[in-house]
Amino acid sequence: MNQNNLIQNPHSTWRLIPLIRASGQLQMAIDQWLLEQHQAGTHPPALRFYTWESPTISLGYHQRRWSESWQQLTWQEKPIQLVRRPTGGRAVLHQGDLTYMVVMSGLTRKRLDAYWAICEFLIQGWRSLGIELHYGSEGRGYIHNPNCFGTATGADLVTAENYKLIGSAQLRRGNAILQHGSMRLEPDSQLFKQVFGEEALPPIHLPIAERGDVLIQRVVDALANAAIACFGVQLVKKPLLDEEWQAILAQPSLEVGSPK
């Protein structure tokens, strides 16, 4: 199936928001605000990439089962933050990762088809970096695992070695869709084991010499170029304006609550 045929996008210009490093709570507020504005017709489709200013666990919107110990976790003598996403899915540990976000409309009503349509730019972008990705094959058994990266469903992307590189989550409001996902670039395996109490995931060996911020920028550039080709649009880079920041900060945050 040609995934581009699933997109009926009347917008030829998308907004590319420059990389933002901030707290998890603020990142989720930005994503939610962009979705609401696009749904209201006051903001074009948007693509952005971001990193988390400190290790953070993001919980899926409907996730109610998770370890009480997470609220007392520390790493390098700093508390690990706990936030709730506006999207579904299981918990994600954000450390050594890069997050992408797409807000758009004009997609098919089928949830998995919409995932595939959006994920095509990830597949093509990573292919340009020398990594072939394919979709996972796990069923709904993922709901019994509090760790998003413990399973790979048909909405997740794994390497040829079956390493889950990208886990994504989605929220639809009317005809508008928010999809964001974590790409594990340089995760700390011991921190992963500390959080989830599982054996650390095997390290990924990227065929890329760069590391740190240089690696992140190379991935961002590759994926932005792929988005232009996959969605057939022009990307216009435009940072968030002061009045937009004010509106984002005025939003109520999603409550984490207590685990059941």
Image (cartoon, rainbow, N blue to C red):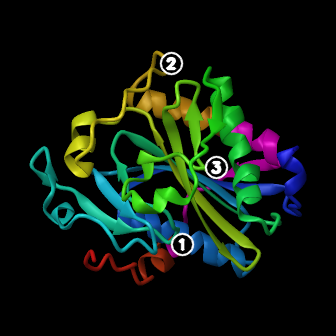
Magenta range: 224-243
Can you identify the residue that label 2 sits on?
208
In magenta stretch: residue 241: yes
Name the disc covering residue 20, or none.
Answer: none
Label 1 Cα crowd, 10 Å radius (few <14 / some 14-19 / many 20+): many
User: What residue appears at the point 19 percent right and 67 percent down from the top-left corner?
Assistant: 68
User: What residue appears at the point 56 percent right and 48 percent down from the top-left corner?
Assistant: 138
Name the disc covering residue 154, or none.
Answer: 3
Visible residue check, residue 232: no
Three-letter code for the amino acid on which mark 2 is drawn: Ile
Indicate whether 178 appears above or below 220: below
Q: Where does the image place residue 172, in percent across and percent down from the top left?
A: 66, 73
Q: Quadrant of the N terminus?
A: top right
Q: Where does the image place residue 153, in percent across and percent down from the top left?
A: 58, 50
Marks 1 & 2, CB-CB < 8 Å contact: no
Indicate whether 31 appears above or below 79: below
Three-letter code for the amino acid on which mark 3 is drawn: Gly
Q: In 3D space, how far apart are the residues under numbered discs 1 and 2 (Cα atoms)?
A: 33 Å
Q: Toward which corner of the image does residue 97 lie, by quadrant? A: top left
Three-letter code for the amino acid on which mark 1 is drawn: Gln
Can you identify the residue that label 1 sits on?
32
